[in-house]
Image (spheres, helix red, strand yellow):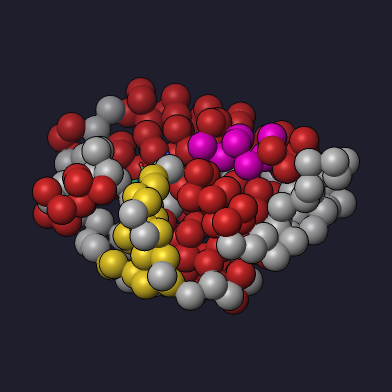
Amino acid sequence: MLKLHFAPNSRAGRIVWLLEELGLEYEINKMAFHPKDLKSDAHRDRHPLGRVPVLEDGDLVLWESGAIVEYILERFENGGLKPPVDDSRWPKYQQWFHYCEGMVMPPVNTIVVQTILLPPDRRDETALKQAQKLLTRALAPVDEALAGKEYLIGDFSAADVMLGHACFMSNRVGCVTDEMTNLKGYVERIAARPHFQTAITMQ
Ligand SMILES: N[C@@H](CCC(=O)N[C@@H](CS)C(=O)NCC(=O)O)C(=O)O
């Protein structure tokens, strides 16, 4: 059975969300979002940087949330969450899927580090402001693309599992502005999905 190594309030939520949307069975190893678990020898054996998510399937140990999502869709079932390569929606599906880790999550990481993870005396206001500016800029095209659409490529897809989760996190850190009305509505739609709720509230 698939085994997901998980910590709360992390990208591992994406994988729980996907597995739940697809109705797949899985086991879960719940760890604390804390070095005592994530940097333990046992977890470093699974992931060289001691990060989550990590998926185990038999002898395979796989990390990087995007790669895990693709693996599950290709190996198990895609439940219509990924358009085929000859579908006209496929290129944009790819674009938004990769925009998540490529452009949106780097400034989200910096904001989380500079507002939560670092002790107040080690925080850097300039780095924080720069990341907030970068994130707001990176979200603008997502807001634009969502005009008249419920989800990134129209119907719900695994691009929403990746980038929708990142937009939810961006909203949490206060970077989805009131002017981004399409994106606000999108984050609300994502948050209202029952399987997303299961994932985001998991501790
Ligand atoms: N690009 C990686 C990022 C993995 C990552 O940085 N995960 C964070 C949680 S969201 C983590 O494990 N952080 C713990 C740490 O940095 O010590 C992915 O998409 O899986």
Secondary structure mostly taken by the magenta-highlighted segment of the chain: helix
Res. 34 image quadrant: bottom left
Name the quadrant of the N terminus. bottom left
Residue at horizontal 39%, vertical 38%?
109
In the rendered image, is residue 177 in sight? no
Residue 131 position in % (x across, y down): 45, 29
> Please, which residue is most extreme toward the front here?
59
Which corner quadrant of the figure contains ligand 1?
top left
Q: Is residue 149 above or below residue 131?
A: below
- Seen in the image, is 106 located left or right of residue 43? right
Indicate yes or no whether the magenta region holds residue 98: yes
**Residue 76: x, y in percent?**
58, 62
> Is 191 displayed left or right of 4 in the figure?
right
* Quarter the C terminus occupies: bottom left
**Residue 85 seen in the figure:** yes
Give above or below for 141 relative to 172: above
Of 65 and 24, the residue lying toward us: 24
Task: Indicate left or right for 48 with 11 as reference.
Answer: left
Q: Which residues are magenta?
A: 95-101
At 35% across and 23% down in the image, what residue appears?
A: 126
Q: Position of residue 19 (x, y in %)?
A: 53, 67
* Above or below, 6 relative to 147: below
Question: Relative to residue 133, is residue 197 depicted above or below?
Answer: below
